[in-house]
Amino acid sequence: MKTLALFIFSVLCSLLSFSQENETKMSAQLSNSTFSRVFTNTHDLYNLTKIDLGINFQRAKGDFYLFVTYGLNTNLLLSSQKSAGLTVFSYKSHMFGGSFEYHLLSIQRKVRPYFGMSILSELATNYKDGFMTPNSFYIINKPLNSMTNSYLFNISNFYQSTPFLGTLSLGCDFRLSKVVRLNFSMGYSLRKMKYKYLEWYDGDNYREMLKNVPVESKMFHFINAQLGLNYTFSIMKSKENTKI
């Protein structure tokens, strides 16, 4: 979180250095993204709904946006997971961080290309110590079974947290009105997950055993598609209206 705070502060200082010479407005954005895991034989889907609040620095040839971001990350079910009795919100993760976007061309254009970057970190989750498959890291509602020397035992990964979710994206925005724009982008995401792995027999108190298991980390690669709606408004309007 310290690294995230330092990143947001440094970008904000850089943008504020030229904001006095360019028009500055407030901006709010609501978006939804679907993430699909890549570089693996398994298919894993997640959904991320974000609320962005921040500042828009308008320039003649393009706009900078700097947002504080809240995100709700949830699982999307595969057919195999549905048959296992899982629900859409078996996994929920509340995330917080920052986002940066640069939109090329004037805000008066009907269509503009843009690129963006976001960094999020998990604040809270309902799935701490929840079951995950040992190799593919699917969300499951019960541990798997394995057998060695005629002895049957249970195995599972246990989810701990997502300290990092970073995304780079490219897309276009479309002017709907003077203050509202629709945006669509495709991106690449890198996710760091912390987890524990445990093997135990029926009758063992695996929750107590889990307390002594070291936390491990693994990186996952995703591609994502995002659709969002942006509303930008002047922060100087009230002051201007009071002038005689």
Image (cartoon, rainbow, N blue to C red):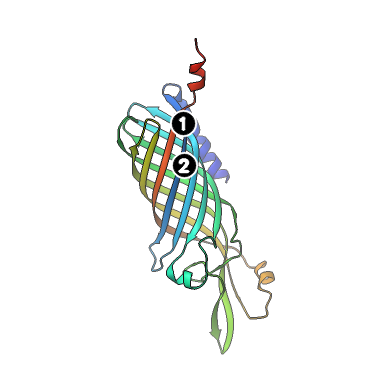
How far apart marks 1 and 2 lie (CA) works out to: 14 Å
Query: Circle 1 sits in a helix, a strand or a loop, which is it?
Result: helix
**Could you tell me the amino acid type at mark 2?**
Ser
Near-viewer residue (65 or 236): 236
Residue beneath disc 1: 14
Near-viewer residue (189 or 130): 130
Q: Nearer the viewer, mark 1 or mark 2?
A: 2
Residue 6, x across and y down, in percent: 54, 39
User: Does residue 99 lie above or below 204 as drawn?
Assistant: above
Give yes or no for contact between labels 1 and 2 (Cβ–Cβ under 8 Å): no
Name the residue at the bottom extreme. Answer: 150
User: Does residue 56 lie above or below 131 as drawn?
Assistant: above
Residue beneath disc 2: 99
- Picture residue at 48% right of the left edge, 38% below the top: 67
Disc on the earlier residue, 1 or 2: 1
The quarter of the displayed image where residue 105 is located: top left
- Picture residue at 50% right of the left edge, 73% below the top: 84
**Could you tell me the amino acid type at mark 1?**
Ser
Residue 221, x across and y down, in percent: 42, 58
Question: In the image, is 202 to the left or to the right of 12?
Answer: right
Residue 137: image tag: none
Residue 170, x across and y down, in percent: 35, 45
User: Does residue 140 lie above or below 58 as drawn?
Assistant: below
Name the residue at the top extreme. Answer: 244
The quarter of the displayed image where residue 142 is located: bottom right
- The local crowd at label 1, few if under 14, some if 14 to 19, many if 20 or more residues have their Cα within 10 Å, is few
- The local crowd at label 2, few if under 14, some if 14 to 19, many if 20 or more residues have their Cα within 10 Å, is many
The quarter of the displayed image where residue 42 is located: bottom left
Residue 41, x across and y down, in percent: 38, 69
- Picture residue at 66% right of the left edge, 73% below the top: 206
